[in-house]
Image (spheres, rainbow, N blue to C red):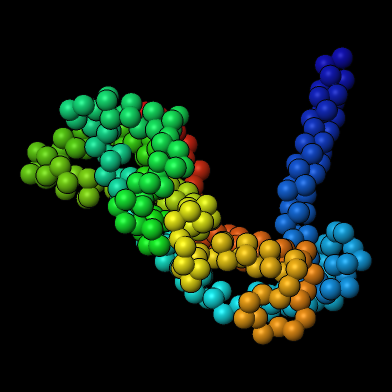
Amino acid sequence: MNKFKTQKKKKGGGLFPIINGSILVLIALACLLPFVNVISSSFASTQEVVAKRFILFPTTFSLDAYRYILSTPTIFKSLAVSIGVTGIGTLVSMVLTALMAYGLSRKYLLGRNFFNFIVVFSMLFSGGMIPTFLVVKYVGLIDSYWSLILPVAINAFNLIIMRNFFQALPDSLEESAKMDGCTDFGVFLKIMLPLALPSIATISLFYAVTYWNTYMTAILYINDSTKWPVQVLLRQIVIVSSGMQAEGSSVDVVPPAQTIKMAVIVIATVPMLIAYPFVQKYFVKGALVGSVKG
């Protein structure tokens, strides 16, 4: 009898991994196939895009969509703007977020509970689009690249994650450093920041994605089209391609709008996909430690 139960358990145990693996493969395919379709459609020929609704692998490769997008003279200027805003914005945001998070993590900070309440309150209630626009206008940031950075320099959610990460570090580290003559800023710079590298890498990725995908703030604050980031310009290319040739384009034949849309998605997504592997090993650890402990 016991032998029969053991064999039954073994059979059941062997069936579960197969079912579980099959379900996970189906979920992975459901997530992966749309990306494959987007990339394949961006490289497909005009005839194939018109004939097929779903493309896994193009039979005839064509670079017409990318040639059309890159023929716009301002595309490289827009890419430079997005790269600059992403790089400088991420640096500014991380410096401000880290400094404020470390201060709010110290239990001896006067008014700590009040400032923490303000941070949480800003997550639930914001000033709104019009008041924010008026503030940006009155401080003279309209048509300035800083209008894409300063209004969103500190994200409350990212700030709370980093604050909780600092709170999880032992107080004895700070006490030992101060006994050796280290100042508060020295403790933060030489001890806390190196230990917070997983959290810094994770939140830097969050900020970088936010700045790279800048669209609405650019529409609101940037009137000069030569200062548009790449997301705004790509959107304009998609709109123009639906009816006519892009302004200044050197391409005589306009590819189908669907192909251009797919190429735009690839151009807008690939830079972040390239950056992700470099911070992947810190991503899970930084997010979990910062969100669970505190």
The residue nearer to you, when weighing 157 against 216, is 216
Q: Quadrant of the C terminus?
A: top left
Task: Please identify the quarter of the rendering in which residue 4 is found.
Answer: top right
Rendering coords of residue 81 (x, y %)? 45, 68
Q: Residue at x 16, y 48 (%)?
A: 186
Q: Is residue 84 left or right of residue 214?
A: left
Determine if residue 100 is in view. Answer: yes
Q: Is residue 198 left or right of residue 276?
A: left
Q: Residue at x 35, y 46 (%)?
A: 135
Task: Please identify the quarter of the rendering in which residue 90 is found.
Answer: bottom left
Rendering coords of residue 157 (x, y %)? 43, 37
Rendering coords of residue 11 (x, y %)? 85, 30
Number of labelled discs?
Answer: 0
Check the image and name the residue furthest to the right.
51
Q: Residue at x 38, y 58 (%)?
A: 142
Determine if residue 91 is in view. Answer: no
Rendering coords of residue 154 (x, y %)? 37, 45
Residue 229 to residue 104: above or below: below
Q: Residue at x 40, y 44 (%)?
A: 132
